[in-house]
Amino acid sequence: MVDRFLELGGVYFDTAYTYLGGASEKGIGRALTSRYPRSAFRLASKLPGWKLTSYDQCREIFREQLERCGVDYFDVYMLHWLNAANYAVCEKLDQFRFLRELKAEGKAKAIGFSYHDGPQLLDEILIKHPEVDYVQLQINYLDWESPTIQSRACYEVAVRHGKPVIVMEPVKGGSLASLPDDITTMFRETRPGDSTAAWALRYVGSFSNVKVILSGMSDMNQVEDNLKTFTNFEVLSDREQEIVEKVASALNNRVQNGCTACKYCMPCPLGVNI
């Protein structure tokens, strides 16, 4: 899958210290960095700041990540999962200073953070830390107007601050890749050859401030389909935008729980399989 992704023109790989209990970064080393020259790809990883208790641990974790991934720098390095609670830890330990140091040393070519909270806090962070190069946001057509995710409002904050956006969850944990037949028909009548995942990716790719779109691909067919979508990429037409909005409305009328299976709420202290 890595070979095919690169062959078709993909270059950006996203991982993090905590993904798959650390196995994700090790897998990057085995499947990608040990097999290709450093110039063939861009690699991003993230610091689990909420797990740390001292500034010095930032450097310790970072060294471990370089070793796991088999690289001597990251193209993009981020603070992971900023929300109100995690941002408080971040500020207490001065973790943005660590990002600035890495960039000055050439150990991180660009810096930023992945974000899971509302627009007001995002605005506060970007006012205080204009040095970041990217903001990573959850954006998809189902969450665009969500009162909890607030994708639109957060995107608009990033635009106002002139920060390019990296999109996570464009297919909402894969849930937008497999839709009920009556809803899928709305897409197929317009573009019979396109998958429902392609519509989700084209939706987020149509925003001018979106620079990178992350897609979790778990088999070769998904690699082929995703890269096909971005070969001679077409932004959504006005008519297609209307169709996506109708699909979003239809889905929101049915879906009671917008879970993306990220498992950030797990394990539940009361043992509930949330």
Image (cartoon, grey):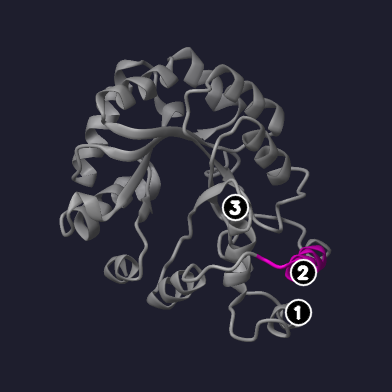
Tell me whether the residue at label 1 lies in contact with that at label 3, contact meaning CB atoms closer than 8 angstroms: no
SS for tag 2?
helix
Name the residue at 38% across, 42% down. 18
Residue under pointer 1: 186
SS for tag 1?
helix
Residue under pointer 2: 247
Name the residue at 43% across, 15% down. 93
Residue 227 x/y as whole percent: 44, 70
> Which label was assigned to residue 33?
none
| Residue 26 seen in render | yes
Residue 21 lies left or right of residue 222; in this view the side is: left
Q: CA distance from mark 1 to mark 2?
A: 7 Å
Whichever of labels 1 and 3 marks the residue nearer the N terminus, that label is 1
Instruction: Give the residue type that dot 3 points to.
Output: Asn
Q: CA distance from mark 3 to mark 2?
A: 29 Å
| Dominant SS type (magenta) | helix
Residue under pointer 3: 273
Looking at the image, which is closer to me, 119 or 211? 211
Question: Up-down: is 186 above or below 263?
Answer: below
**Residue stretch rendered in magenta on the structure:** 236-250
Q: CA distance from mark 1 to mark 3?
A: 34 Å
Residue 197 x/y as whole percent: 58, 70
* Label 2 environment density (alpha carbons within 10 Å; few <14, some 14–19, many ≥20): many
Instruction: Give the residue type that dot 2 points to.
Output: Val
Instruction: Give the residue type that dot 1 points to.
Output: Met
Looking at the image, which is closer to me, 183 or 74? 74
Residue 161 x/y as whole percent: 62, 29
Quadrant location of the N terminus in the rendered image: bottom left
Tell me whether the residue at label 1 lies in contact with that at label 2, contact meaning CB atoms closer than 8 angstroms: yes
Kindly report which numbered mark, 1 or 3, lies closer to the viewer in this rendering: 1
